[in-house]
Amino acid sequence: MPFEFYEALGLEPKLALDVEDLRRRFYQRSRESHPDLAGSEAEDRMALLNDAFRTLRDPVLRAQYFLQQNGIELSKDVPPELLEEVFELNMALEEIRGGDESALPQLEGARNRFAGMQKEIDLELEAIGARVDSGDKTALEQVRSALNRRKYISNLLRDVDKELNVHLSN
Amino acid sequence: MAYSNKVLDHYNNPRNVGSLDKSDPNVGTGMVGAPECGDVMKLQVKVNPETGVIEDAKFKTFGCGSAIASSSLATEWLRGKTVDEALEIKNTDIVNELSLPPVKIHCSVLAEDAIKAAIGDYKKKAASKNQSVGVNA
């Protein structure tokens, strides 16, 4: 069933959600369908509620799920400038892994820039989400574009942080 | 999941790693990426403008073994082909040659995209060059 995570928590499919309200609904419904209270057929229900809560409480996972339920998958579409930056940063990472620490300042600078970009994308997602919720279906494509970029950046930040941790702890 | 011997060979001894001068009018550059896995692939071709034959091809890929092997193989295949022949290379050719498993097919798609982007960039450069000297392409 499409949007079953929303349905499980008694919500209309919207990109913007009140997380406190979500939490209350989750606890309420969890009590009602706890396996000890409602028998073994409630286990499936509990699993669904867990998945629904975990997905919907996170704005990025929620947006990804929302797109998916609209039949839209993430794509390879990212702006060429971002690809260039990702490439350059990977070059710096490779040099540092090879023992050349002269690229460390570049890496730290890039880390901060990418972290900033990620925050901007999160704000952008919120703004586009509001448009989607008010019925603007064309904004869905922009949600996808924002998520594509965000995915790239978060993968990269993970790699960069791993490398910076190694070098800062030395 | 184990990598095939051919993938391992390209991964351990990648062919044609490096870069060509991006500003050279005879060099086409393709930069593609896969947000899901964070891979990024740069592939470049140097074309003889008289014959349309690809004389050199270089790549640099940050990604998994299959992505590196796919782009390494692509540069091997590109050398000596005309730009039009190069556009005939399909990701399925790469899949077959490297025996890529289904979960790694997207790596071969990335390599095909990189080829198309590099050739596209070269053609764009060639067209604007012809225009600027007043020759009809």
Image: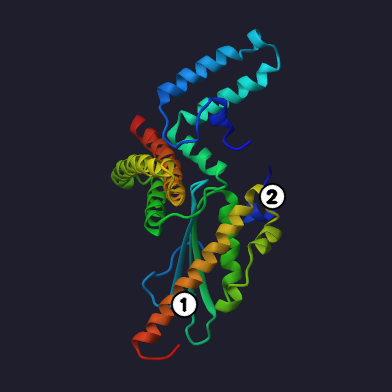
Which of the two marks, 2 or 1, is nearer to us in this view?
A: 1
Q: Mark 2 and mark 1, same subunit?
A: yes
Side of B99 relative to A91 (left or right): right
Assess disc 1: are there few (<14), some (14-19) or many (≥20) residues with their C-alpha within 10 Å of its C-alpha. some
Q: Is residue A37 above or below residue B125?
A: above
Task: Give the amino acid type for the residue marked by disc 1 in the picture.
Answer: Lys
Assess disc 2: are there few (<14), some (14-19) or many (≥20) residues with their C-alpha within 10 Å of its C-alpha. some
- The label shown at residue B123 is 1
Q: Position of residue A50 (x, y in %)?
A: 56, 23
Q: Chain of mark 1?
A: B
How far apart marks 2 and 1 lie (CA) works out to 33 Å
Q: Is residue B42 above or below residue A109?
A: below
Which residue was labeled with disc 2? B101
Q: Is residue A170 above or below residue B70?
A: above
- The label shown at residue A149 is none
Residue farthest to the front, as pictured: A135
Q: Chain of mark 2?
A: B
Quadrant in the picture for residue A156: top left
Q: Position of residue A124 (x, y in %)?
A: 35, 44
Name the image colouring: rainbow
Callout 2 touching callout 1 (CB < 8 Å): no
Task: Give the amino acid type for the residue marked by disc 2 in the picture.
Answer: Pro
The foreground one among B64 and B31 is B31
Marks 2 and 1, the one that precedes in the sequence = 2
